[in-house]
Image (tube, coloured by chain):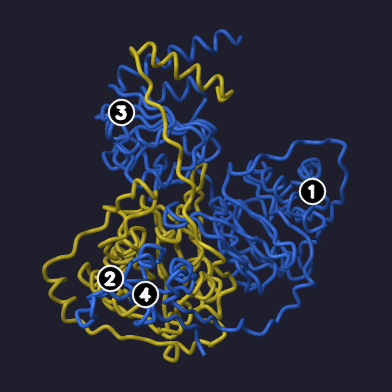
Amino acid sequence: MSNQIAVSADKCIGCGLCFKACPFNAISMAERPTHPRKLKLAVIDMHTCTFCGACVDSCKNIGAITMIKDAPAVLDTDLSAYRGVWVYAEQRHGEISPVVYELLNEGAVLARKLSVPLSAVLIGDNIEAKAQDLIHHGADKVYLFDAPLFIEFQDDSYSDVLSHLIVEEKPEIVLMGATNIGRSFASRVAARIRTGLTADCTALDIDPTTRNLMQTRPAFGGNIMATILSPRHRPQMSTVRHKVFKPAVKDSSRTGTIIKKGVNTATIVNRTKFLGFIKDTTAKVNLSDADIIVSGGRGLGKTEGFTLIDELAEALGGAVGSSRAAVDAGWIPYSHQVGQTGRTVSPKIYFACGISGQIQHQVGMGSSEIIVAINKDPSCPMMKMATFAIEGDLYEVIPWIIKEIKKARGCQI
Amino acid sequence: MHIVVCIKQVPNTTNVQIDATTGTLKREGVEAIINPFDEYAIEEAIRLKERFGGKTTVITMGPPQAEQALRDTLARGIDNAILVSDRAFAGADTWATSYALAQAIRTLGDYDLIICGKQATDGDTAQVGPGVAEMLNIPHVAYVKKIEEASNGSMKVERMMEDGYDLIETPLPALITVVKEINTPRLPSLRGLMNAKKAQIPHWNAETIKAEKLNIGLTGSPTQVLKIFSPPLRPGGEMLQGSLEQVAEQLVAKLKNAQLI
């Protein structure tokens, strides 16, 4: 028996509401020349349909679409055996990644709603000192794996220890940062322990009756939001976007338990070899951590334009980003690209200088708190979506802004 | 060297417009294209074959229409294409998709390297590549921006990170997911297009790949969509007026008032 969804040809009036509502493009409107009123008929492509139910909702006044979902497969896990909220305390080069403090803050909220403790999992080499820091930021318990083998992140060895720990301790929720490490590593762990993983979440909540984690995330480049559940599996795993939640406030009086886990190097699978790290020297400030990003696009017209962008970024203490057009033109390396085929960022302020704001770029920066657009064309999409739009030549506007910032900074000192 | 590439068809968002009143995508006439990141995976596979010999196979899981995407890859120089298609796969999340692709690759037999795009532009999860590797019990490296060295038994790759890149050595067989920086994809050749037109593309169903019913489609998916909604519209902004000096002054004052600078 598989899931079924059907459109009643008698009831369908061809209004197209379901066609518009379907987030997966699974519905088409077919002509019906034989119909007495020539009304169109909604046709659902069964291969594309994910049975999300958006069309059923859109048709509730007409009731032409019916859906029967499979009875859930027999539960093979006792959900009540899983308790507690975990945060994976990602570290890079011995430093805790900033997203971890945000996860601790949000994890504490979830743990309170579930009346369970909040734990952190810390894997690294010579990292014990950081365990106390995690407790000061809200962890009740820290599972610590400290061994030379873990000095650098490798998917194999890290997945091995985290999967084993999850199977042993049975948490109900595991949160990880939606960083390059988190997204690669969480995928592997979820595949191994056969549980649900929701990527890049921007909102989390608990359904108090089922204890299900309601995970909300943008899809189709942020054009739709989806709330996802893993109702039959535990733990419920999510990677969470950086800068969505506020970081936990440090409280040095907090106490907690540090559980040092033994590491048996011989049994840990580690097929890859870490050979080295090469720092990106073109970026003074890391794009994903930056509170302020100044991006340049096609409107710069030349590679030298980034000197001005750099100057503004430096005045603001921000990072330098770019549109795809500027990267493709060879003006700046790919590591700076924001957008669909680049990075997704959500800073407090995003400056879009000479960027028209095609959908692919919007996808990467649309969740910024404040957007400042500088463009010659007042009607381009970026100028319309911007919080503050400035019409003009960026080569004339930016120097004035730098001047004003320096003036403002000068007053503060 | 046998290189397998996993691809996905996604809606083409290049020319998509946003409906100003509803803030949603205008979906009329949106065509399906190969996921942009998969283009780099396809190109890298062809380049490796040109250097080391062997063969390339591309796999996709999707509706029968996905055959067109597979023909596009043949036109560029991929040797074989397989469509994994069955109504029973409908509604698969990343876990069930990883499972089905891993089963299909097992059915292929020997392989040395699997290449995927870093993520698809519709779901944006980046979860299927690592998931396939785990289910095949082979190592993976995500976000690869360059293959520095490759031989029959191992490979040295650059893994793009937020602050630079890591240099990783992995034994083969392995799976890598690639980012845009790795190459510039070629266009199909005329001869390629001719061959692609004539090519027979096998269709594999759940039975062919020996998939367990409980692991595929919606039933095999741990995650379920509870609801889907449009994000709140961004409130309209403000066009700053006046001379450049006044505009700059206003902007800095506003940012300062919001305690952002």
**Badge 2: residue crowd in 10 Å (few <14, some 14–19, many ≥20):** some
Identify the residue position indicated by label 3 in the image: A375
Q: Is residue B148 visible?
A: no
Looking at the rendered structure, the secondary structure element under dot 1 is loop
**Mark 1 to mark 3 CA distance (whole Å):** 46 Å
Residue B260, horizontal then vertical, whole percent: 56, 25
**Mark 2 to mark 1 CA distance (whole Å):** 48 Å
Rendered image quadrant of residue A74: bottom right
Circle number at residue B60? 4
Label 1 resides on the chain identified as A
Colour in which chain A is drawn: blue
Q: Is residue B186 visible?
A: yes
Q: Are marks 4 and 1 on the same chain?
A: no
Looking at the rendered structure, the secondary structure element under dot 4 is strand
Eyeballing the image, is A189 above or below A395? below
Q: Are marks 3 and 2 on the same chain?
A: no
Q: Are marks 4 and 2 in contact (CB under 8 Å)?
A: yes
Eyeballing the image, is A253 above or below A1? above
The kind of residue on which mark 3 rests is: Asn
Residue B40, horizontal then vertical, whole percent: 33, 59
Q: Residue at x 20, y 70 (%)?
A: B75
**Mark 4 to mark 2 CA distance (whole Å):** 9 Å
Q: Are marks 3 and 4 on the same chain?
A: no
**Mark 3 to mark 4 CA distance (whole Å):** 42 Å
Circle number at residue B69? 2
The kind of residue on which mark 4 rests is: Thr
Q: Nearest to the eye among marks 3 and 2: give it.
A: 3
Quadrant containing the C terminus of chain B is top right
The kind of residue on which mark 2 rests is: Ala
Circle number at residue A139? 1
Colour in which chain B is drawn: yellow
